[in-house]
Image: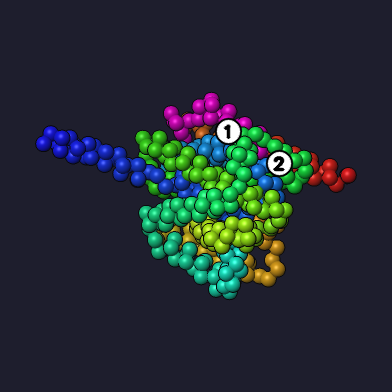
């Protein structure tokens, strides 16, 4: 009898903790996973096909940068109860706000365009009419977000995040050189060309994103997570950061172990899906293709929500996922504009999707140092953060991240200038 009572009391003791954890987790995993969107998968696939395992060490370093910056954004949103755009508008001059929001919108819009190019690519793989597949997908995303409430939308996003296991399975199916892949995690290698540098920048830009900073802060703020639950929020952020680059590792491994070793060049993730079939079988092709569709749909939803958050907050308008169309009309109008403008552009014949796609990933890296500057300034404000301000270690990590990103950008432009005079 005592044992039964003991077991029952133990269950009662742990249930509140489990429910609390479930009420907090979500934004970090969703934001991290959505970094592996259509543009990200294309970038990882091309990186593996062109350079084999040479760039995997970049992923390892990015994991720490992603975890640190996303934790900062989550903490700022939880403590202040506001999104990043709202805080920038309230605490910095108008010109600074206009500059960062404009650049962020351009980068985000290009990312959404990349999502629909991924959806279009899947249609081409299976011979489905582009207009039908792209527009129906745009309609499905719009319906899910506009008709759903916050909790249901989060469940859909988390389910989509779990489906990225398809890329892990595909990675094992290609039977890569695991010793070379694991060694590349901690042993850096470098090819002194501007193309290699650009690909490294694109890898960073597709993993540590502008929209990710806006999304995670606004999403935590709207979710209403309390400051006493910061540790659970951190765990959510760290899990998302590890998961996103774990999946990215397998995408690079899959293309490096098949396409790179056979000297097969590709332009995007759809090419990778087709090219994998002779080496890893039909199932690998389908896993890559439907993984791309899942990633494109998740990315389109999350990046567009992040864009709507940033613009409505910048203008001081009501902007919530959990509000109805009438209460938050500006939010949903921006959402619909981004969804359907990019979906329609993808349908234009011979539109240069690939250059826009890769450039959008690199643009993230160019704008990120400016965004991090604002983020760090806000995180050190006592009137905003109180006792949750950045400590010395986090400030050093933040400024080192800014310096490293700026150095990469400068190096790329130096390479471009030098190559012009050769």
Q: Residue furthest left?
A: 1
Residue 394 magenta-highlighted: yes
Mark 2 highlights which residue? 409
Q: Where, by quadrant of the figure, is residue 220 drawn?
A: top left
Mark 1 highlights which residue? 398
Residue for point 63% across, 67% down: 345
Judge whether 287 appears above or below 168 on screen.
below
Q: Quadrant of the N terminus?
A: top left
Judge whether 101 appears above or below 11 on screen.
below
Label 2 to label 1: alpha-carbon separation: 17 Å
In percent of width and height, residue 198 lies at 71, 46
Region in magenta: 384-406
Crowding at mark 1 (Cα within 10 Å: few <14, some 14-19, many 20+): many
Residue 311 magenta-highlighted: no
Q: Main secondary structure of the magenta part?
A: helix
Mark 2 or mark 1: name the one nearer the start of the chain: 1
Q: Where, by quadrant of the figure, is residue 127 drawn?
A: bottom right
Residue for point 36% across, 35% down: 228
Give the structural element (helix, strand or loop) at label 2.
helix
Q: Is residue 412 left or right of residue 181?
A: right
In percent of width and height, residue 409 lies at 71, 41
422 vs 113, nearest the viewer? 422
Q: Is residue 309 left or right of residue 280?
A: left
377 vs 356, nearest the viewer? 356
Give the structural element (helix, strand or loop) at label 1.
helix
């Amino acid at each position: 009898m005592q044992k039964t009572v003991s077991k029952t009391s133990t269950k009662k003791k742990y249930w509140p903790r489990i429910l609390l954890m479930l009420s907090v987790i979500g934004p970090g995993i969703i934001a991290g996973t959505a970094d592996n969107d259509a543009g990200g998968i294309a970038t990882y696939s091309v990186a593996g096909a062109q350079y084999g395992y040479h760039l995997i060490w970049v992923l390892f370093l990015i994991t720490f940068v992603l975890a640190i910056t996303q934790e900062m954004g989550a903490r700022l949103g939880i403590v202040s109860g506001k999104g990043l755009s709202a805080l920038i508008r309230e605490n910095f001059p108008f010109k600074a706000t206009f500059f960062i929001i404009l650049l962020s919108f351009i980068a985000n819009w290009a990312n959404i365009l990349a999502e629909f190019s991924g959806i279009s690519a899947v249609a081409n793989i299976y011979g489905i009419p582009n207009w039908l597949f792209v527009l129906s997908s745009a309609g499905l995303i719009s319906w899910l977000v506009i008709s759903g409430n916050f909790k249901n939308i989060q469940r859909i996003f988390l389910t989509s995040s779990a489906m990225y296991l398809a890329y892990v399975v595909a990675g094992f199916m290609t039977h890569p050189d695991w010793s070379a892949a694991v060694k590349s995690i901690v042993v850096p290698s470098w090819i002194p060309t501007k193309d290699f540098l650009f690909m490294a920048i694109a890898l960073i830009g597709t993993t540590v994103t502008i929209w990710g900073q806006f999304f995670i802060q606004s999403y935590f703020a709207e979710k209403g997570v309390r400051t006493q639950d910061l540790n659970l929020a951190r765990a959510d952020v760290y899990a998302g950061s590890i998961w996103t680059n774990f999946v990215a590792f397998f995408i690079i491994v899959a293309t490096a172990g098949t396409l790179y070793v056979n000297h097969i060049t590709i332009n995007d993730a759809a090419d990778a899906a087709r090219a994998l079939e002779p080496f890893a079988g039909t199932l690998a092709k389908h896993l890559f293709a439907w993984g791309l569709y899942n990633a494109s749909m998740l990315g389109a939803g999350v990046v567009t929500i992040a864009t709507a958050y940033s613009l409505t907050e910048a203008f001081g308008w009501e902007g919530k996922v959990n509000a109805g169309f009438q209460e938050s009309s500006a939010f949903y109008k921006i959402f619909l504009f981004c969804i359907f403008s990019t979906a329609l552009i993808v349908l234009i014949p011979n539109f240069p999707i690939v250059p826009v796609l890769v450039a959008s990933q690199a643009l993230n890296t160019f704008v990120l140092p400016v965004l991090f500057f604002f983020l760090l300034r806000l995180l050190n404000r006592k009137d905003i953060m109180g006792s949750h301000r950045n400590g010395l270690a986090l400030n050093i990590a933040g400024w080192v991240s800014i310096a490293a990103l700026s150095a990469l950008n400068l190096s790329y432009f130096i390479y471009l200038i030098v190559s012009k005079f050769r």
